[in-house]
Image (cartoon, rainbow, N blue to C red):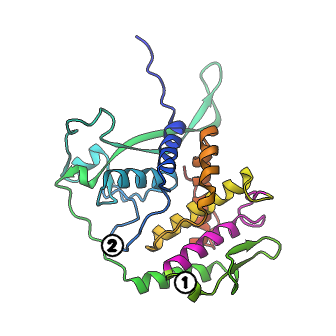
Amino acid sequence: MTKKAQRNLRQEVTDKVLEALKNGVAPWVKPWTGKPGDGIHMNPDTGTVYRGINVWLLNIAQMANGYSSSEWVTFRGAKKLGGSVRPRPEGVEKGEWGHTVIYWQFIEKKDENGKATGEKFPMLRHFTVFNRDQCDNLPETEVEAVPEFERHARAEATIEATGARISYGGDRACYIPASDSIQLPNKENFHNPESFYSTAFHELVHWTGAEKRLKRTKGKRFGDSDYAFEELVAEMGAGFLCAEHGISGELQHESYIGSWITALESDNNFVISASSKAQKASDLIANPKAKELKKVA
């Protein structure tokens, strides 16, 4: 009997994001509406809120299949809640009915004699979830819709709580490393409040990359690989924050899509690494006083 080939999860994740980008869809941009549960992918069985790269994987699955819900359960989770996952429909290939989410599991190394060394290394693992729309008889989740003015007020509070130095005026939005400050146009110059908040979140993610914060490297010139990577981190980080606040996301740098596609085609760790750094950045912005940032996939 031949040993079953191990799944290359990094490549699978990369291929999904790459296909979306080539089809003109940035998975971190979604029209959040403030509808109950919209924009926050969660498991009603465990209460888990999906984070990191899993947000984009589930965004892709939701948009591609037209699911109306952002809730996902495992096969066992559906049964535990008193419901069930529907049988795979005819015409749907085996393995295509459920959707993959990933996580890191730390494995302890062993010496040549099979004894534990005390040293651990991360291993990428996966499990399968199903959208509420793929299930029957799941209990309804009660989530109160948040009015637009309250969502905007929360976004304002988040921005202010960072303590970042922000100046308003002009026609550019940027983070200035030399002065560790952010420049934004006046609020009234944006097409709508959502555009302002998504832009502010984008620049705040850049702000987290400073040496005294999360120590990320930014490229020296527009278009180089480090610059493109940092822009992807900022896009994803803003996407996390927009989802958390119920704000409509907006792609800031369409010009980088070509660079991201090139990077993804040559490096299957690119998008996973960017997602991890973006999650850490958004965590810091949402809770600037936190002493430890949770590690995410």
Label 1 vs 2, first from the N-terminus: 2
In percent of the image, x 62 and y 31: which residue is there? 109
Nearer-the-camera pick, 155 or 79: 155
Task: Identify the image quadrant of residue 170.
Answer: bottom right
In this rendering, the answer to whether 46 lies above or below 203 is: above
Amino acid identity at mark 2: Lys
Pointer 2 local density, CA inside 10 Å: few below 14, some 14–19, many at least 20: few
Quarter location, residue 196: bottom right
Dot 1 alpha-carbon crowd within 10 angstroms: few under 14, some 14 to 19, many 20 or more: few
Region of the chain picked out in magenta, as a range: 194-219
- Image quadrant where residue 38 sits: bottom left
In the rendered picture of this protein, how many numbered marks are placed on residues?
2
Res. 269 in view: yes
Q: Amino acid at mark 1?
A: Glu
Q: Please state the horizontal and vertical placement of residue 225, each as a whole percent of the image.
A: 72, 50
Residue at screen point 36% across, 59% down = 47
Asked if the residue at tag 2 contacts the one at tag 1, i.e. Cβ–Cβ closer than 8 Å, the answer is no
- Residue 53 in picture, x, y percent from top left: 51, 51
Name the residue nearer the viewer: 276 or 69. Answer: 69
Q: Residue at x 47, y 44 (%)?
A: 16
Q: Indicate which disc residue 156 carries.
A: 1
Considering the numbered disc 2 on the image, is that residue within a helix, a strand or a loop? loop
Determine if the magenta segment contains residue 145.
no
* Helix, strand or loop at mark 1: helix
Q: Quadrant of the N terminus?
A: top left
Q: Which residue is mark 2?
A: 35
Q: Is residue 199 magenta?
A: yes
**Alpha carbon separation for disc pair 1 and 2:** 20 Å
